[in-house]
Image (cartoon, rainbow, N blue to C red):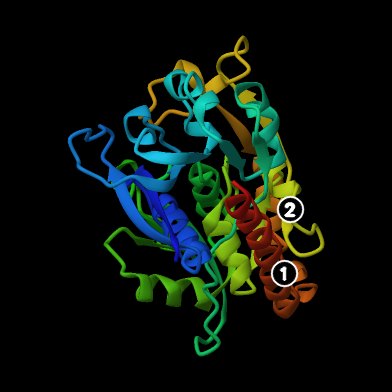
Amino acid sequence: MKKTACIYTSNTGVGLVSDVDLLQDLLFEYYDIDVVYFNHKFNTTTKLDKYDLGIFIQCYSEEYSVLNKKNIFIPNEEWLDVNVLSQIHKVDAVICKSTFARELLVPYNNNVVSTGFISLDKNNKQVERKNNFLHLGGKSWQKGTESVLSSFNKNKLPLTFIHSNKNFDDLHKEKNIHYISNFLDSGELDIIINENVIHICPSIYEGWGHYMYEALSVGALTYVTKLPMFVEFLDPDLVVFLDCKFQQLDTKSKFLFLNRDRHNNTHQFGWVVDQDCLDNNILEYKKHLENHNPDKVRAFFKHLNEENSKKLLNVFLDI
């Protein structure tokens, strides 16, 4: 008989929904799984059964943790706040997506492990590839979108830019940039991800970075910032690493994100891409394409997914 589990998270972004879907696929042979989405405020009146395991992604609630025999917390550390940090010593395990996150959180729990994570495989061989540029900004403030737009405003190369951030609606629309801000279903989005061969992902911060790994899954030539969580897992021969500089607004706190409103869309710290490095590498895209092997990139993604799946599953089965 399967054990029971409940995943708790906030339904505020594509990344968290992907986390839920991926964990359900990973654990379905071992657990009957329910999902509770928080909408910033925890609904403590919901009547739930006692679960063998509670899995909290990014959010944590003591009110819900008591409903589970054991609890696991999976942080996206850039969104942690003081309240959550003060409580996570109570969970049975903290699963971090990078060693960078683990080093930050070791002081707060006796069982903090780093497993990496997994992402959806978006590869569709039926979609014709084109040597075009894509930047998938979504609604996030941390994708390095301003740097990308700055480059393509200057170089006039064709770029497809997908976003749902209202801050970009009033921008002057350059003719070489195809702005897509309307809703795309998963099928439409997957076609765009597959057909554009060059993905520009100069993130300021990523807990994991699904959009970047999904680019690898389709064999794209992917430009990525040298974030510690990317450097840890990526083969430098298979991506275009971009120089960056760590910037912060608060120099006193180790957890630089603790001193801002949790839902304030202004980052406190991150690795800002070097604009000249980004500009020059985009202009040299033909050279990068000559050395690019999509099959090797896809094979790398699949191997990383398989290895991290094993690590994750072992933690869940050992808890």
The outermost residue toward the left is 45
- The disc, 1 or 2, on the residue closer to the chain's N-terminal end is 2
| Left or right for 259, reference 285 | left
User: Residue lying farthest front?
Assistant: 1
The residue pinned by badge 1 equals: 303
Q: Quadrant of residue 264?
A: top left
The residue drawn where x is 25% and y is 32% is: 41
Give the residue type that dot 1 points to.
Answer: His
Q: Position of residue 126 (x, y in %)?
A: 51, 90
Picture coordinates of residue 259 (x, y %)? Answer: 47, 15
- Residue placed most toward the observer, 191 or 17: 17
Measure the C-alpha gap from mark 1 to mark 2: 11 Å
The answer to whether residue 300 of the structure is visible from this angle is: yes
The residue beneath circle 2 is: 233
Query: Which mark is in front, 1 or 2?
Result: 1
Residue 89 quadrant? top right
Are the residues tagged 1 and 2 within 8 Å (C-beta)?
Answer: no
Q: Nearer the viewer, residue 208 or 112?
A: 112
- The residue furthest top is 252
Residue sitting nearer the eye, 251 or 2: 2
- Total number of numbered labels? 2
Vertical arrangement, residue 236 with respect to residue 247, above or below:
below
Looking at the rendered structure, the kind of residue marked 2 is: Phe
199 over 243 or under it: above or below: below
- State the image coordinates of residue 301 (x, y, percent, origin top left): 67, 68
